[in-house]
Amino acid sequence: MIRKTTAIAAFACLLLATTALSAPAKAPISPPQAVLGHVMGEDRYVPNYSDTVKYWQVLASQSDRIQLVDIGATTEKRRQIMAIVSSPENLALLDTYKDISARLGRAEGLTDDEARALAAKGKSVVWVDGGIHASEVETDHALIQQVYDMVASDDSEAQRIRDNVIILFAADNPDGQDYVADWYMRFKNPAERETNFDSLPKLYHPYIGHDNNRDFYMAEMAETQNITRILYHEWRPQIVLNQHQVGPAGTVVFIPPFRDPFNYNYNPLAMTSLQEVGAALNSRLLSEGKVGAVTRASAHYDTWTNGNLRTSTYFHNAIGLLVEIIGGVVPEPIQLVPERQLPKNDQPAPIAPQMWTMAQSVAYSVSINRATLTYAASNREKLLYNIYRMGKDSIDAGNRDSWTVTPDRITALHAASAAAGLKPVPTRTTGSSAIELRFYDDVLHDPAYRDARAYIISPNQHDFPTAVRFLNALIKMGVTVERAITGFTQAGKTYPAGSYIVKAAQAYRPHLRDMFEPQDYAENFEYPGGPPIPPADASGYTLAYQMGVHFDKAQDAVSVATEAVDVVLKPYPGKIAGVGKAGFLISHATNNSFILTNRLMKAKQKAFWLSEPTAVGDGAPESGAIWVPNTPQSAAIIKAAVTELGIDAYALAAVPASTKTALKSPRIALVDIYGGVMPSGWTRWIFEQFEFPYTVVHPKELDKGGLNAKYDIVLMSDSLLPNRFTNKGGGMFRGKFDHKQPDPARIPAEYRGWLGTITPDKTIPALKAFVKNGGALMAIGSTSQGIIDAFDLPVQNGTTQMVDRQEQVLPRTKFYIPGALLTATTDPTTPLGYGLEPKVDLFFDSSPVFRLKPEAIDAHTPIRFEGKDLLHSGWALGTDYLQGTAAVVDLSYGSGRVFLFGPEVALRAQTQGAFKLMFNALYDGALPRKK
């Protein structure tokens, strides 16, 4: 029943990197309806990605104003095509203008005069995209119409745009666009087509759904890598227009600028430029009588968090524009929201309640695109010079003593004044006061708080292959990484040759600082003592912390010969030390040790965990070291793995005396539901990267029972069951627990088995029987609280209070942690803690934490929150309530095991410092329960 998507892999053969099929500019230009048979904005029609590229190909055959470029393969191996639109004269010199834009974006080796000369010669570069969230289909319509407008229009504004601007049009999520459009259009009769996308059976990115717009500092997905290569390596556009749906109720569209907070790492010129463009968009809409646009605090969007396509631009000195517009596949109402009818700065021209069509939204989107491009044309030299200026400022700041002022330094200012016995002096501005000028230098410019001039990552650390993954994330986002050619000493510490150095003196200093430094989020409340105002996404996310990377900050220049690294790195090859014939001893410290273990299991080779602390090579004794008996096959696997995975193996002459636990390949059931949940999708991705075999199961499969015959462990990710105290997920879960169940008769047979939800009368009894009969159940995030309740486990939520004899969650005025990194204490002597360091950073966002009840027997808490200063990055209110709570619980249930993980240990494939917790539980849960 599903419309087959035309393969477009062959398109790449027809497209040269900068060569287009072309025709004279005066040739007739076909509008979309002439090629696709539909007007953009038409009700009950969704163009798929193949339609988009088909239409662009027609334009490229008719006009010399457009060239098509293949920017790489997608997750499902489609070719991702970018349409470049400009004047024929500009397209003939495309490489020249690309080089100018890239040179100014890098800002290296140029004087101000040289930069101004390049800016005078160059052309503004603007990226315009659509469809990153594939169910936001107005953006697909708009993108096609915007390209047509810029290719076909001959008015003076369009000509001026093409003369001064190079426009990079791209569909962000080709796989998802094909999937969503083909699903929607499966009914030939438009009247039979649905009014929304609730019936979609799976995520609209093959792995991560909506979170594909949260991958823009980790850059795990193929599409992210394609896009960031254009944005931060090859072209470095000055403006990025990122189109989404849907804006606040009672409005038509949200456009920039944004509400506070301000991230202290990016250049203020990025924000003032953003405000300029936002004003131009608003004025353009109003000048055309298009009312209903809102900005700033009219919505929750902000510029704090890195990692979105749009927000990542600020940390790369570009202007990122977010558009969130109404417009569905059928007309929908603009509701009467009383507060939206009062004009104010954030909503200067309210719109009357009315029915609204997608065609109207497409008209708005074309106007917004025109306004953006007209701004770029009118401010061509300024945009080009300013991106250089911001990059140059970053380079200069990285080459001298500099300080970044954050909220904690303002607190230190007040504290220093108070400690000196001084009282603030009222100023002429009501409500403000001043302190003595000397504190500006003594506190805000205290030498001890200088910004790092470089970050040094030594190969001599706990899990160096994971540190290399971190470096690769930086490289993919355009950061320059250098490798020391010789050993060197910095601040009294010696580093070996091969250490990596990330110098701050580079254009993308804001981004690299955001990945190394803790986020110090400014506390933000509705009123003093009132509830907190949530950030748009995470408040703290320092990637180096999430990945458990050890690094040193160099506050003075690093003097050592280096070589630049501009390609994705591999770990340094490991080695096999020794010549013993009994077997191989391998450390549990690296995440890559699980790839090796999985390869051994796949080859039916034996491997063991050693319970007692055992020294591996020159390292300190560790619990959980891996012992592999020597066979020709195991030796071959290990020999290949040490080179590829960057881990060492030690060939011993005798079998270690430690107690051994024989491992078996875990038979993993990964639970998902109809429509898909992002945490489960991310877990699939992680399993595949680390070579864990798994089977996706849906509730109907669980309901059948007999699970022990097929599986050793059932993994239930965050968001599969609600946390009854918050009805929210434990990680960055964006949805609600109202999973839609379409009419089975209206969906293809292949998906009907996916229908159903986790029910108390069928699913829970089947899971209980599975665990009682020796299986293991792992529940993460909100699902862990759901399992506690469903199984009546002797575990109490750690952040609740009794009110009128009822257990209630602590109010947000007392306890609130909106996506932050907290440091937990581990027990590396327990199987779940094997390979961990004594401390691990966990991502915490409304996450359950646990206290064992007195009746809990055979229960362990290998990861706990203990001590002061739990907050490592972000905003946390009331961390004292976490003292003594467990982040992870391992307890018996019948003959089996239940693992409860409160914080989401697999969040967006970023929390790699905590991956071993999950990986250990998978293997430990597959083992027979010890009596």
Image: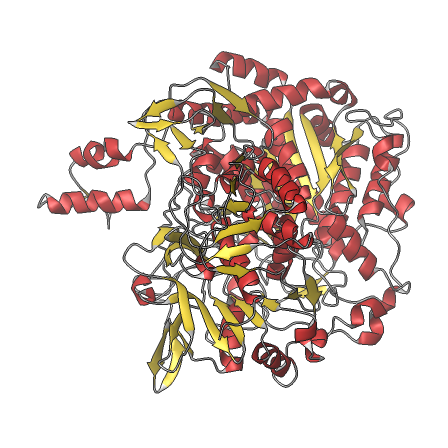
Image quadrant assignment for residue 810: bottom left
Residue 911 visible, this angle: no
Instruction: Tell me: 53 left or right of 797.
Output: right
Image quadrant assignment for residue 32: top right
Residue 127 visible, this angle: yes
Of residues 416 and 761, the one nearer the viewer is: 761
Q: Position of residue 261 (x, y in %)?
A: 41, 48
Instruction: Tell me: 913 left or right of 204.
Output: left
- Identity of the residue drawn at 81% across and 27% down: 16
Question: What is the quadrant of the N terminus in the image?
Answer: bottom right
Q: How many marks?
A: 0
- Identity of the residue drawn at 44% across and 46% down: 548
Of residues 729 and 664, the one nearer the viewer is: 664
Q: Position of residue 869 (x, y in %)?
A: 29, 54
Q: Position of residue 113 (x, y in %)?
A: 50, 12
- Identity of the residue drawn at 84% across and 46% down: 51
Vertical placement of residue 870 versus 406, above or below: below
Instruction: Tell me: 457 left or right of 735.
Output: left
Is the image coloured rainbow, by chain, by secondary structure, or in one colour?
Answer: secondary structure
Of residues 143 and 751, the one nearer the viewer is: 751
Of residues 332 and 21, the one nearer the viewer is: 21
Q: Position of residue 748 (x, y in %)?
A: 84, 68
Vertical placement of residue 710 versus 92, above or below: below
Vertical placement of residue 345 versus 717, above or below: above
- Identity of the residue drawn at 57% across and 62% down: 922
Vertical placement of residue 739 versus 230, above or below: below
